[in-house]
Image: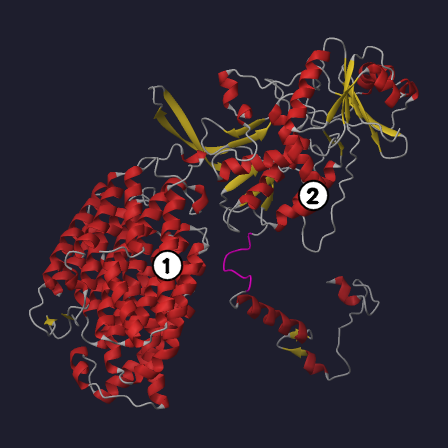
């Protein structure tokens, strides 16, 4: 694993020592090379995980997430070039450094063996993200957004620290590979209930669960584009990944404890999808759509069946790429019109036809069109939740319909219809933007040819 | 509160002995605690208020309170808070599909509206125009004014009383203008205005106080014409628009910060397009009678008062900075015409006079509505040359439609677009003030 971590850390001196006109080129090119090297991880030899050392390992669950994380860094750098044009070089380099730090911490989070290391990296990722949101966001509300983001996640994850220390004391080790096999069945006693809650709360806040989701629309909307991309694509999946890891130690208590959170996710899916239909702010719409998709993932993880785990992992990867692409598209709008209000930029298909193609593809994948991996994830989740309880098919079905409604609403509102007069002179799309969208959608479409790599360890 | 503290004791602050505010005959040392002399309850309530404002939902924010300043960013900035500006704001908020979709800011440099054309206007509304679009605008505006309490209702506020006097307009035409007047009336009837043509005998029979010398034909508006109180309309619009969430800013727009794009049109000509980024600026049934000479008058109230006036011709145009009334202008230009038309006016006495502004369009004396061809995010609604007040509701709706839908939907105002200036197509009214 050091073969990924050290090059990522060395990207920092690369940025600081590059000439001013080469910082973007250098960092983007080198991070792209590092992301290609991450594909080696796909070579999983046996049912056990690939163990690199005592501290790092990667198994079929963390591999796709890791590849996604490393793929996203060059994309984030490409997306940020435009809004940082007017900043002095030192500040640009600081921004890139924040992104690189975040990347290094995320790699270590996804590959940590020891759960305390996982926890430390999990918390440490909050700091660069907070700096990116509050320093480089656009509106004054970003301070409030940073506050919400920081404190929701922090307060949710403090009990996790206590629970992990308790586990260390009782079981003697927090090495995940050992704990999988040592896990004792948990009886339904009060202290076990609280331990279950302590373990899961951190990840439920991060996902986010419907009742604890207030930080997400604020943080996603106020963050600059790279912040939104990494939040939507990777940081939310940290919650899912953590839940997938930690539920192996919490059986059979999960069957009883999961009920309220399952109800919240099932109801929350529909609520947040409906809220999307009434949004006037484009980024806010995409943020609520993230909450809706992640609610499916939470429901899948809490019912703990093989199909649902496969669906959850597939959906995480698919949603990561789709959501990130939607945020890039919204940002390309914002850079031209300087407003996120949807009414003000309509009928763009006539002006920017190729960008309209990317909009169409992103909306179609967002509404889980066959044969994309979005559909595979959603279908597996719907089927497994149906077998858990038959009436949930009504809620899930309603959610799928409403998701289709708001995805198409977003597409039609921004692309079709009579254009407003004041977008007559918007600049045409840059090649960089087209490259960005292509690099999002090509992995997504290629994965539909071979989805088994993202279906996780239970495939 | 400083000197008020001594009020209860009746001792002035400069007296030689000082009085403390004590809570009762308690021991002295109780008052001189770490919180100073008394006022414990005040301090506790202050702390409680601070805690309550910091909790989520309170209005405290770590930045300085900027609620008195205009917002940093707004989707639409309306320059000028007169009746046309407020009407555009009202319709933008009314036609947006979701509440809060669009952020509107109205910049007005004088909140007393002392020099605004709206309040200095005579307040008449008529459908007797020659352009069908003008007639349609006035028809919708009159429907708006008649149902104003349905359009502009605000919860818990009293209903508006516009004092709409539907007494009609009476236009008098001499021999030369008679044919034009007939054609105009035909167009007006087609659009749905109720106007009737009267000969001089019918005129004498209906209004015996008129001297019909020199009048060949008269057109009298039977319904939906008259005058109303523009100040009431303005206040009603202001109150409604504030309740819909439009932000107001007291200031004057002095400059625009814009960026320009050099682009080529389809035929290869080079054009520079600009985009604005920042915005730094007149007996009981008597109608309003308009004489062919340009003088007009109407009844005002029920106490035998009349409002009359006249626009000066091009040569006599006074300095626009000066709103001082020129009394000689009345004596020489206005009064002779009024006295000739209505013999009873020979004995009239001037009680009060004021001067107002016309947004005068020197090209064809009709409004300019729609987008600017070169500045891409600027829209016009101006230049109505004396009939802006009566067309304000309909024009506001038209501009809001162009902004939100991209084209005129209810009333087609394409003759009033800016493009007519460089295409040379005048949208001229005929035989009108």
- Residue B384 visible in the picture: no
- Residue B44 visible in the picture: yes
SS class, disc 1: helix
Q: What colour scheme does the image use?
A: secondary structure
**Label ID, residue B148:** 2
Q: Position of residue B132 (x, y in %)?
A: 61, 24
Q: Residue at x 65, y 36 (%)?
A: B83
- Mark 1, residue position: A401
User: For the stretch drawn in magenta, what is the main secondary structure?
Assistant: loop
Of A217 and B152, which appears nearest the observer?
B152
Q: Which residue is at the far left? A: A45
| A164 displayed left or right of A265 | left
Subunit of label 1: A
Highlighted range, magenta: B58-66
| A112 displayed left or right of A154 | left
Of B391 and A433, which appears nearest the observer?
B391
């Amino acid at each position: 694993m050091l073969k990924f971590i050290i090059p990522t850390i060395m990207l920092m001196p690369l940025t600081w020592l590059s000439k001013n006109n080469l910082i973007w080129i250098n960092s983007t090119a080198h991070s792209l090379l590092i992301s290609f090297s991450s594909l080696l991880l796909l070579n999983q030899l046996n049912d056990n995980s690939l163990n690199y050392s005592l501290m790092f390992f990667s198994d079929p669950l963390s591999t796709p997430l890791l590849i996604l994380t490393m793929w996203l860094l060059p994309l984030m750098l490409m997306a940020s070039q435009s809004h940082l044009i007017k900043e002095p070089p030192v500040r640009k380099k600081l921004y890139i450094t924040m992104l690189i730090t975040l990347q290094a911490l995320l790699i270590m989070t996804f590959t940590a063996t020891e759960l305390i290391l996982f926890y430390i990296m999990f918390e440490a990722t909050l700091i660069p993200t907070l700096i990116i949101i509050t320093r480089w966001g656009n509106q004054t509300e970003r301070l409030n957004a940073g506050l919400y983001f920081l404190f929701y996640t922090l307060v949710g994850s403090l009990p996790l620290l206590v629970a992990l220390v308790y586990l260390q004391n009782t079981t003697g080790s927090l090495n995940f590979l050992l704990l999988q096999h040592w896990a004792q069945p948990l009886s339904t006693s009060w202290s076990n209930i609280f331990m279950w809650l302590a373990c899961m709360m951190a990840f439920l806040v991060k996902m986010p669960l419907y009742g604890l989701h207030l930080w997400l629309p604020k943080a996603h909307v106020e963050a600059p584009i790279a912040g939104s991309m990494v939040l939507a694509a990777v940081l939310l999946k940290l919650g899912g990944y953590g839940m997938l890891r930690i539920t192996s130690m919490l059986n059979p208590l999960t069957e009883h404890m999961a009920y309220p959170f399952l109800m919240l996710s099932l109801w929350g899916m529909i609520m947040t999808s409906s809220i999307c239909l009434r949004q006037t702010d484009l980024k806010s719409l995409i943020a609520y759509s993230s909450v809706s998709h992640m609610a499916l993932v939470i429901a899948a993880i809490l019912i703990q069946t093989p199909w649902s785990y496969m669906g959850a992992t597939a959906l995480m990867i698919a949603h990561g790429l789709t959501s990130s692409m939607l945020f890039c598209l919204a940002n390309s709008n914002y850079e031209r019109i300087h407003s996120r209000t949807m009414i003000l930029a309509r009928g763009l298909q006539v002006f920017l036809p190729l960008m309209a193609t990317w909009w169409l593809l992103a909306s179609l994948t967002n509404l889980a069109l066959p044969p994309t991996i979005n559909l595979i994830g959603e279908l597996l989740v719907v089927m497994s939740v149906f077998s858990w309880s038959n009436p949930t098919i009504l809620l899930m079905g309603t959610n799928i319909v409403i998701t289709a409604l708001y995805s198409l609403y977003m597409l039609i509102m921004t692309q079709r219809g009579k254009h407003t007069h004041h977008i007559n002179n918007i600049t045409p799309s840059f090649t960089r933007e087209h490259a960005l969208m292509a690099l999002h959608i090509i992995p997504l479409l290629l994965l539909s040819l071979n989805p088994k790599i993202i279906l996780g360890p239970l495939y | 509160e400083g000197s008020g503290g001594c009020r209860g004791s009746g001792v002035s602050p400069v007296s030689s002995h000082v009085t403390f505010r004590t809570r009762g005959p308690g021991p002295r040392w109780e008052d001189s605690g770490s919180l100073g002399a008394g006022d414990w309850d005040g301090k506790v309530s202050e702390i409680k208020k601070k805690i309550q404002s910091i909790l989520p939902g309170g209005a405290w924010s770590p930045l300085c309170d900027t609620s008195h300043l205009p917002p940093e960013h707004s989707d639409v900035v309306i320059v000028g808070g007169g009746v046309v500006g407020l009407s555009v704001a009202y319709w933008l908020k009314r036609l947006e599909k979701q509440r809060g979709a669009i952020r509107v800011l109205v910049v007005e440099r004088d909140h007393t509206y002392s020099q605004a054309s709206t309040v200095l206007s005579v307040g008449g509304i008529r459908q007797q125009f020659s352009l069908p679009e003008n007639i349609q605008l006035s028809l919708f505006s009159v429907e708006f004014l008649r149902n104003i309490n349905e359009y502009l209702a605000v919860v818990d506020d009293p209903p508006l009383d516009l004092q709409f006097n539907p007494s009609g307009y009476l236009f008098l035409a001499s021999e030369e203008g008679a044919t034009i007047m007939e054609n105009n009336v035909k167009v007006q009837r087609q659009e749905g205005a109720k106007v009737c043509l009267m000969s001089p005998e019918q005129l004498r029979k209906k209004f015996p106080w008129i001297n019909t010398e020199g009048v060949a034909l008269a057109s009298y508006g039977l319904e939906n014409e008259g005058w109303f109180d523009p100040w009431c309309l303005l206040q009603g619009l202001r109150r409604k628009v504030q309740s819909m969430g439009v932000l107001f800013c007291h200031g004057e727009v002095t400059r625009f910060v814009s960026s320009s794009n050099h682009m080529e049109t389809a035929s290869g000509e080079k054009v520079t397009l600009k985009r604005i980024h920042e915005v730094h600026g007149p007996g009981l049934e008597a109608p309003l009678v308009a004489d062919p000479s340009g003088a007009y008058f109407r009844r005002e109230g029920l106490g035998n008062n009349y409002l009359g006036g006249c626009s000066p011709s091009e040569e006599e145009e006074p300095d626009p900075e000066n709103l001082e009334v020129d009394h000689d202008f009345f004596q020489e230009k206005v009064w002779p015409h009024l006295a000739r038309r209505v013999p009873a006016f020979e004995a009239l006495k001037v009680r009060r006079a004021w001067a107002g502004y016309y947004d005068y369009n020197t090209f064809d004396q009709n409004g300019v509505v729609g987008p600017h061809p070169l500045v891409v995010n600027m829209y016009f609604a101006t230049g109505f040359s004396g009939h802006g007040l009566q067309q304000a509701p309909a024009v506001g709706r038209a501009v809001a439609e162009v902004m939100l839908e991209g084209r005129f939907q209810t009333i087609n105002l394409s003759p009033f677009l800016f493009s007519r200036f460089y295409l040379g197509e005048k949208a001229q009214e005929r035989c009108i003030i």
